[in-house]
Image (spheres, rainbow, N blue to C red):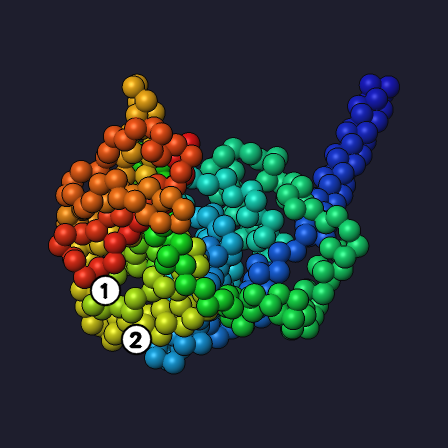
Amino acid sequence: MGDKKTEAACDGRSGRGAVHFALFLALLCVTLGALNFFGVKRDSSSALPLLEIMNRDDVDLVFVGSSVVRNAVNPELIDRTTGLCSFDLSIPGLELPGAAACIRLAEEHNALRYAILMTDPEILMKSGKGTGIQRRIWPYLRNPADKAAYYLDLCRGDGQWIEHLLVFQHGPVESWKDFRKTWEIEKHPEWYLNRMNEENPDIRYEGRGFMRVLTDENPVHRLRTEHHPWHGDRFEGLSALTRRRILELSRFCRRRGTQLIVAIPPAHPLTMLSLPAAMEATAETEALCAENGICFWDFTRMRPEAWPDLQPYFYDLGHMSGTGADIFSEAFGTFFARYMNGEDVSGMFYPSWGEYMAEAPMVNAWMDFTMEPGGQVRIFADFNGGTGVEPQYRFCVIENGAERILRDYVQEAQEILVPAHEVRGKKVRVYIRDAERPEDEPVYCTRECP
């Protein structure tokens, strides 16, 4: 009898222990959820489009990408020619896990016909941890299944199971003003939008995800003369995880009756010409899409005769001004309307990087110095441009504001040896022109010899 009472008491304690543990887990989940919602500082340019897409049910076409896409796509102009209702759901720094989460969020509230994933080449070249971006998206994933899918996708990329549960650690609320901003954006997004537009004279959020950059700066001169080649990582091939993410997203969209289109957003030509690994990444992504029946467009390989010239409208290597966004969006709307009507639009792009490179002009010059024995300086110059360029080089030293030619235009002679006393501490300039395009203005680079 005593043994039975002891067993019953033990069973009771075990039952109460299980209940207490369950209550503890529930309290922990509620606390963690509150911290990950109220404890995250709101990013205005991410919050506004995410909240807006959650309150719409009429979107047919959604663009998802990084700030490069957010600044380049004006949905209003696209709608005029396509007859669709489009939306630019792009988040600064967005990587593939976040892109998938944004498409799921859009699908939850809208019957999408098309989802265009515009991914930067740099994103394709890495798996992406996404922790910094997680804080921009996580508070707006109200569906537990969406949260779980996003969390698991992040964790399989880097294995940081605990780190991704503590979202509030990344960009935490630091003041009452930060906390109040959370309330303002959530409860009064239109009022906050008007206030944000007043406080930020250089940008204006115009709704449906489009962030207009209010600058008329033409950076062509700066890009051609100041940007040197990128010495980026070598491309080792698309990772198995990147391939899996693209294919999983395609299957998800098909189940929802949505066509997924993978695209590379427009960028200044210097971006690709100075980073061969990016070309390799986009080519391999294109092959992956072709093998699996996914439509792929590369807007860095647009044929110049088929598209407007966007180069004057990039205020850096990837981001366009509002004027450039309008020009691209009008052209895209016409292009997409043709695609919807069943036309073959592949001829508007170079079919391969080889053909693109054969016709690409020079976009910038660069120069390096090497100190040689015997008191001489070796000046080496090169350019970023296509394989069809026939370069001619002119070297000058700038003295008292005037140029003195060290060597005039000579084809293929891209380096020169000069006595150190002629150039040390002085500005040296190299001009490079294409013998096959004499009408083009030469590119040049100016640097001070150390």
Which secondary structure, mark 1?
Answer: loop
Instruction: Please identify the quadrant where the N terminus is shown.
Output: top right
Residue 439 on image: x %, y %: 18, 61
Side of 325 where 373 appears, left or right: left
Residue 390 on image: x %, y %: 15, 48
- Residue 33 or 372: which is nearer the viewer? 372
Disc 1 marks a residue whose amino acid type is Pro
- Residue 390 or 68: which is nearer the viewer? 390
Quarter of the view holding residue 151? top right
Disc 2 marks a residue whose amino acid type is Thr
Q: Residue at x 29, y 19 (%)?
A: 374
Can residue 316 be seen in this snapshot? yes
- Residue 316 or 294: which is nearer the viewer? 316
Which residue carries the number 1 mark? 304
> How busy is the neighbourhood of tag 1: few (under 14 within 10 Å), some, or many (20 plus)?
some
Which residue carries the number 2 mark? 334
Which secondary structure, mark 2?
Answer: helix
